[in-house]
Image: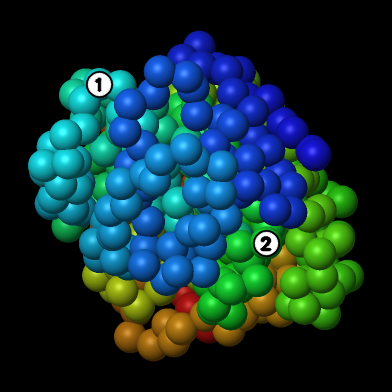
Amino acid sequence: MPSYEVRTPQAAYSVLVEWGALGRTASLIPARTGRVFVITEERIWRHHGSRLTAGFSCPPEVLYFPGGEDRKRLATVEQLAEQMVAREADRTSLILAFGGGIVGDVAGFLAAGFMRGIPVIQAPTTLLAQVDAAVGGKTGVNLASGKNLFGAFHQPLAVLIDPQTLTTLPEREYRAGLFEVIKHGVIRSPELFELMRRRIQDVFARQPEVVERMISESVRLKSEVVSADEREADLRRILNFGHTFGHALEAETGFVRFLHGEAVGFGMQAAAELACRAGYLDRAACDLIRAVVDEYGPIPSLAGIDPDRLIALMASDKKTLQGRVHFVLPEAIGRVRVVTGIDPALVRASIQAALG
Ligand code: GLY
């Protein structure tokens, strides 16, 4: 089974990628663990719960959390924590985050804070969470004023990726995850970008060989980046390609119109435009990035989005440091740089171009 290692100052753990891997969950739970709390969505539990718990000697406690970016809030974390207390959780308890990126972020943050921190195992079930969100220990929730503004780094004990879960993933969510795969191609893997460019039909058909390559290459790359820079002081910032614009779009539309991956798709188009207009990327490469993103669309309508509102929201994004907005801009397919001090007129024009 392909396995990738993450080694950070906080923790060292494996990310396992294997068809049917959910059946191994019980073997990853350390001896002397008390109650196991599965945080999940009802739909995921119905489809895949029995495979997750196959080797358990006693059934876990299951807490449902209806997904949706608008539910990724502090109030949800408090409600889940209260339910855990009511079911006699203690410091020996363990959380199993079993769902998409939102479940992983909320359950991971719950684990980071519950009784000052208990272990979490991430078992992601969406493509987006498998290729990105579940690896690297970022956890947290949104504030009304912005995306992921409240959270913690809390590395998991292990990440268990079972591509079989993608067989029941709704089409729109699958597509949203594909944008994060394209992101990985642009920032660090020309081979992955080529795969996304040339195997579009196989990607849409969820052909197992292609799905495993998308996940494995993304996890390999992400494990490498997170091991080099857990706290996003430097290298990890490249993973935010498309996110400066994308987070602003999500916040502007109340976190309900776009899935996160779709907003990143828009954000990558704006960032590619900006890289071109600011002289970092040639027009042909910019157009190629935009064309590949378009192939995996369409995303919901961008009608009525005001570029100036997005620019204002970028200023409150957590990637903005001391008032300076950081942009991750491609210089070529497979290479990006982090840039500040860009002329606001260029930013505006790039958003306008991406809005179409
Ligand atoms: N999704 C970006 C990161 O984990 O750093």
* Residue 48 screen position, x and y as percent: 53, 62
Residue at mark 2 to residue at mark 1: CA–CA distance: 32 Å
Q: Residue furthest top?
A: 9
Q: Quadrant of residue 286?
A: bottom right
Residue 352 appears in the picture as rendered: yes
Residue nearest the viewer, comparing 34 with 17:
34
Residue 4's tag is none
Disc 2 vs disc 1: Cβ atoms closer than 8 Å? no
Residue 151 versus residue 347 in the image, above or below: above
The answer to which image quadrant residue 28 occupies is top right
Q: Earlier in the sequence, mark 2 or mark 1?
A: 1
71 vs 231, left or right, is left
Q: Residue at x 28, y 53 (%)?
A: 63
Q: Is residue 51 left or right of residue 148?
A: right
| Tag 2 residue | 164
Residue at image coords 56%, 42%: 55
What x and y, as percent, mark residue 91? Answer: 25, 21
Q: Residue furthest front?
A: 57
Residue annotated with mark 1 = 91
Residue 65 screen position, x and y as percent: 28, 59
Q: Secondary structure at mark 2?
A: helix
32 versus 338 height, above or below: above
Q: Three-letter amino acid code at disc 2?
A: Gln
The residue positioned 39% from the left and 46% from the top of the image is 59
Amino acid tagged 1:
Arg
Q: Residue shown at 78%/55% (left/top)?
A: 212
Q: Quick one: SS at disc 1?
A: loop
Residue 251, horizontal then vertical, whole percent:
29, 63
